[in-house]
Amino acid sequence: MKDKLELLRSAAKAEIHAADSVQAVDEIRVKFLGKKGEITAILKQMGSLSAEERPIIGQLANEVRADIEAEIAGAMSLLKDKALNAKLEAEEIDITLPGKQAAKGSLHPLNSVLENLIDIFQSMGFDVVDGPEVETEHYNFEALNVPADHPARDMQDTFYLGPELLLRTQTSAAQIRTMETRKPPIRIISPGRVYRADEVDATHSPVFHQVEGLVVDKGITLCDLMGTLEKFAQEIYGSDTKVRFRPSFFPFTEPSVEVDVSCPKCGTKGCNMCKGAGWIEILGAGMVHPNVLRSCGIDPEVYTGFAFGIGLDRLTTTKHKISDIRLLFENDVRFLEQF
């Protein structure tokens, strides 16, 4: 039995030294040291030995097992290092090769125009404020001098969530919240999503974006409003853009105006984009109604102000000559890649 164990030791070492892979060494381990391995098979024969021989053979068997395990551990370490070095050599990077340009996205056209708009008004000293999209009737209508029987409060125009609670139809509500918490002078814009029960078509959507502006201070006049909006339009559309103001009506401003710009596509000659008019309406504005100032605790005998509401979606479509507002919301990558 001693001779068999010594032969196993020699045979195991020879096979281990000849192995050329981690897998091959592991197979040798199972062959000699496994539960059904050759050393185990010899130890099962120890019952036939005398009491004097058993400890001698047992000790030798343990030495042989320890010897083989040490050989296997050394071979495994060497082969793993060899495999790692081979892998590193195969994956060697040529640092002289030009790098690959990583694909990167870009701003959505709405966000791009909004950032441009914010930069313009911040350069004029405006702060950016936010307001909740779920509003109360008080902030969305009543504080803005919109009486209960006004058509805008009809269910067909407004998404009501419950008594006195609705999805805001205009970001003007943020102006009221600002005037309630700040003292003049106030100079803010408030961008955000608004909701109205409109049919979806090329120029309308039930979810769209507005940017409201508000200035309140002593001595603010309609000329200040006109100068501010003219500068804004020329920054957005180009320095040769013409601006036109038309009388209009809004419950929360008096006097009120609609603001048109010369068509970015044809000037004022008339084309399909402006429907032959030569002008495109971009926003409504006016002097803040005294009732609105009074409802926010601001004395209209001391302070005056102006407000304006810009349709960001229309601003984006006219600036980039986009014919259908739905393209802004469909997330068609072929369309977005153009920006």
Image: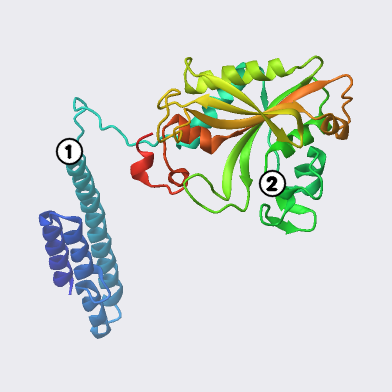
Instruction: Say which amino acid is labelled 2.
Output: Arg
Query: Which residue lies at the image location 71% right of the left edge and 37% below the top edge?
Result: 172
As drawn, is 117 to the left or to the right of 296?
left
Q: Is residue 77 above or below residue 15?
A: above
User: Dot 2, crowdedness within 10 Å: few (<14), some or many (≥20)?
Assistant: many
Numbered circles on residues, count = 2
As drawn, is 1 to the left or to the right of 148?
left
As drawn, the label of residue 89 is 1
Q: Quadrant of the C terminus?
A: top left
Query: Which residue lies at the image location 42% right of the left edge and 24% below the top edge?
Result: 269
Q: Is residue 304 above or below residue 25?
A: above
Please tell me which residue lies in front, 19 or 190: 190
Can residue 89 be seen here?
A: yes
**Label 2 element class:** loop
As drawn, is 269 to the left or to the right of 183?
left
Please tell me which residue lies in front, 77 or 89: 89
**Label 1 element class:** helix
Query: Which residue lies at the image location 63% right of the left edge and 44% below the top edge?
Result: 194
Task: Give the percent coordinates (x, y) of residue 209.
Answer: 58, 40
Task: Give the percent coordinates (x, y) of residue 69.
Answer: 26, 59
Please tell me which residue lies in front, 117 or 271: 271
Instruction: Say which amino acid is labelled 1.
Output: Glu
Can residue 308 be seen here?
A: no
Task: Give the percent coordinates (x, y) of residue 315.
Answer: 52, 32
As drawn, is 72 to the left or to the right of 234?
left
Query: Which residue lies at the image location 38% right of the left edge and 40% below the top edge?
Result: 336
Q: Is residue 92 above or below residue 141?
A: above
Q: Quadrant of the N terminus?
A: bottom left
Q: Which residue is mark 2?
A: 168
